[in-house]
Amino acid sequence: MSVQTENLETAAEHPALAADMVTKPFGRDRTIGIAIGVILFVAAIALPFVTKSFFVFQVTMVLIYAIAILGLNLLTGFNGQFSLGHAAFYAIGAYTAAILMDKAEISYVWTLPVAGIVCFAFGFVFGLPALRLEGIYLALATFALSVATPQILKLSPLEHWTGGVQGIVIMKPDAPFGLPLNQDQWLYFFTLIVTVLLFWLAHNLLKSRTGRAMMAIRDNPIASRSMGINNSIYKALTFGLSASYTGIAGALGAIVVQFVAPDSFTVILSIALLVGLVVGGVGWIPGAFFGGLFVLFVPNIAEQFSKGLSGAFYGIILMGLMFLMPAGVAGFIAMLRRKVLRHEG
Amino acid sequence: MSEPILSVRDVAVRFGGIVALDGISFDMPVRKIVGLIGPNGAGKTTLFNCLSRLYVPSDGDILFEGKSILTRPAHRIAEIGIGRTFQNLALFQNLTVLDNVRIGGHCRTRSDYVSDALNLPWSRRNEKQIDESARSIIDYLDLRGVAQRRVGDLPFGTQKRVELARALATNPKLLLLDEPACGLNHEEIEELGERIRHIRDDRNLTVLLVEHHMSLVMSVSDQVVALNFGRKIAEGTPAEVQRSPDVIAAYLGTEKQ
Ligand SMILES: Nc1ncnc2c1ncn2[C@@H]1O[C@H](COP(=O)(O)OP(=O)(O)OP(=O)(O)O)[C@@H](O)[C@H]1O
Ligand SMILES: [Mg+2]
């Protein structure tokens, strides 16, 4: 509401501005926003009842990757720190959930906050030395983290907990309160609730004083310091927060897949998340969903073209997308909006 | 005479073999506009960077309201009331004008990740306070029409004004302006002179103004300090400094180069 009135005032008081920033499209933007929201909401509720179980599982995984990518986006897109290490945080989250359920028989619901806290701690501690590194050097350090993680998970002293190379198998939870849902349907709704919650929190954060400080550091670290922003604290905390999001995604992934093993969390996963981030749009929250869709479906599509050349097809699809949408889905949508506005004005 | 708001005492800065500042001392009286002039490379920006703790002087001390600032880290300078602009714009390019100015209010407010993510009542109150003060400064500097625009898309002169607005949003007692007239046209420069004086009067500020545009410095400054090769070569009223043989030589010398 406030956004809309703001623009109305501005345009009314500055006739020159009113010419290129007409008030009408903003009012209409809102309507379109609400319409999209309603359609998505109805579709999200109806989906598990009208599609096959396997597809429900796939969409659940899309949501999980979207959370992981949002985590990466908080760090890279909004705070300007690179990471090729997010598979490590995903793995720590997944193992935290699996071990808690396997050894301590803790309910899957409670493994999420624990995974979030554990990964926050790991991310924060890793973020402290990372303060000295920037750009490609930070990318390299985080790359090392994700190369090391699968091997550490296989170490024999840890085998009692991690299950070594075998990993850990966990049980799929049933729907609670006697809800008439099968396990896949319930896990979908459970993941959906967590996703909505985490995206809502990120949205609030990014439009607050804290979020602005994060973006200020990204855009100009010297100016941000001179504005009184403690860059180090914000960068380390953002690293923790980002790891926490990705770790919660990892925990959800473990619950949904019912299995964790070291080789599911190699550096390939880190790269997949980075690809998802770029495809969706760096620095745009909803981009994470498009990134999730890409991470989950594009490898399958590539495989359908050709089993032997699936990697090549994946590459071609990726290049084609980046050629069509150099700034990801975010840039594409922004461009469409500009076109529509220009067409009308 | 009352205590100076800023005392620079024998400040020296070296970069390897280059002596950028060589024992600079001067005082700034409260609510005055002090011009800092000198040829290219004289050390003006280096002095600014010492005042905002981006550079560490190898010698000397800087007192703000009687207390040394050298024990403070750079991110705790804004909160004691030293605000600045940069010679080459240092804006948050991807953010809107409004957000840039809101970030200026960072040092005047408190918040944390958890309350901000949950949008708790005190977080909202905070936001409202930041927003109101940012908007009043935006109006004050006639930036209302571009408040929602991405700052990187705006013309240079407007960006300069946004930077000034951002500095004012930190609510400074001492405002450091590094070549605010650079890149502005004749009309804008005249406006700027007026503006600097108004800001000083309306907000009870002290201003340290680095500027190459001589008629601007000489017309707005109450006092002028001239540097050359890291040394202070003159100090006094604009008229005194303009008459100083060292200043004349310094400027003629650079013109010959
Ligand atoms: N970070 C740095 N590293 C090395 N040398 C520096 C650095 N900053 C400034 N210098 C040197 O210190 C001297 C003073 O530079 P400074 O930028 O303070 O000059 P200035 O008076 O602001 O000049 P201008 O009017 O051109 O802006 C110059 O010789 C410059 O090359
Ligand atoms: Mg300079």
Image: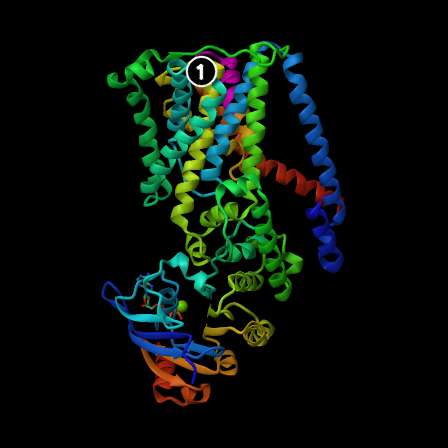
Q: Which residues are magenta?
A: A294-309
Image quadrant holding the N terminus of chain B, namely bottom left
Front residue (pair B236, A345): B236
Q: Position of residue A132 (x, y in %)?
A: 32, 45
Q: Which residue is mark 1?
A: A309
Determine if the magenta segment contains residue A208. Answer: no
Residue A261 visible, this orientation:
yes
Name the kind of residue labelled 1 in the image: Leu
Determine if the magenta segment contains residue A301. Answer: yes
A45 sits to left or right of A272: right
Q: Position of residue B233 (x, y in %)?
A: 33, 82
The residue shown at (63%, 15%) is A48
Query: Overall secondary structure of the magenta stretch?
Result: helix
Front residue (pair A148, A332): A148
Q: Position of residue A141 (x, y in %)?
A: 32, 36
B168 up-or-down from B198: above or below: above
Front residue (pair A327, A292): A292
